[in-house]
Amino acid sequence: MHKILADTHPDAHCELDFRSPLELAVATILSAQCTDKRVNETTPALFQRYRSAADYAGADRIELEEMIRSTGFYRNKTSSLIKLGQMLVEKYDGEVPGRLEDLVTLPGIGRKTANVVLGNAFDVPGITVDTHFGRLVRRFGWTAEEDPVKVEFIVGDLIPKKDWTMLSHRVIFHGRRVCHARKPACGACTLASLCPSYGTGPTDYADAVKLLKGPRVDELAAMVKP
């Protein structure tokens, strides 16, 4: 199934825009309960204004809140960003650490965010168990676990470590483009013959194709055209 996902989504990648570990950590914190598209619309001005951990540590709360307001939960996120900047300055010389055990001690960063940062900013393999990933691996029958940490370890035992980061991107891409939560495009899915949840959504090809999303809809549809 992972090999098919790799063939299905050759364009899979982190959909948050960033140029440094700090920018990715900030973008990932902002992405909680918010779309990547909205975050990417917000971060250019933010990254222009706040270029270092020290900038976040000394940020004016009202100004920062206003800049990230559109991402939702902006008061909590502002607190996380300021505290993140402060801890990075105090403990890590203003640099984002490249180890999971250090990252998870930082304000606003749990295992999911830590694995995003590790995999995409440091090239350290990590499995990102977000809502899409957890939902799909349960549909795929890879695990019945609901707890993200347990899901991370169970799936990690199934897939070679070197593939963990790309696996995360491919599963998340599939969740956003094909295997939707309420109405998956089962009849237009490259995993149809292997998926134990086939039939959760429309199995008719024409009906399923209408549910496909993203910039490669025509390509995705052509892959399974009867």
Image: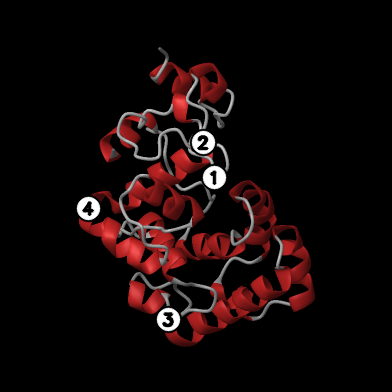
Helix, strand or loop for disc 2: loop
Between 18 and 112, the residue placed more toward the observer is 112
Identify the residue at image location x=53%, y=79%: 107
**Labelled pair 1, 4 in contact (Cβ < 8 Å):** no
Question: How far separated are the C-alphas under marks 2 and 1?
Answer: 6 Å
The residue that mark 2 highlights is 184
Identify the residue at image location x=71%, y=62%: 72
159 left or right of 91 in image? left
Q: Earlier in the sequence, mark 3 or mark 4?
A: 3
The residue that mark 3 highlights is 92
129 left or right of 218 in image? left
**Labelled pair 2, 1 in contact (Cβ < 8 Å):** yes
Q: Amino acid under label 1?
A: Ala
Q: Amino acid under label 4?
A: Leu
Question: How far separated are the C-alphas under marks 2 and 4?
Answer: 24 Å
Residue 158's tag is 4
Q: Residues within 10 Å of mark 4 (few under 14, many from 20)?
A: few
Q: Residues within 10 Å of mark 3 (few under 14, many from 20)?
A: few
Q: Earlier in the sequence, mark 1 or mark 4?
A: 4
Helix, strand or loop for disc 1: loop
213 left or right of 10 in image? right
Residue 181's tag is 1
Q: How far across and down, in percent of the image, does residue 216 sit?
A: 50, 26
The residue positioned farthest toward the bottom in the image shown? 90
Q: Which quadrant is the N terminus positioned in?
A: top left
Q: Which quadrant is the C terminus positioned in?
A: top left
Helix, strand or loop for disc 4: helix
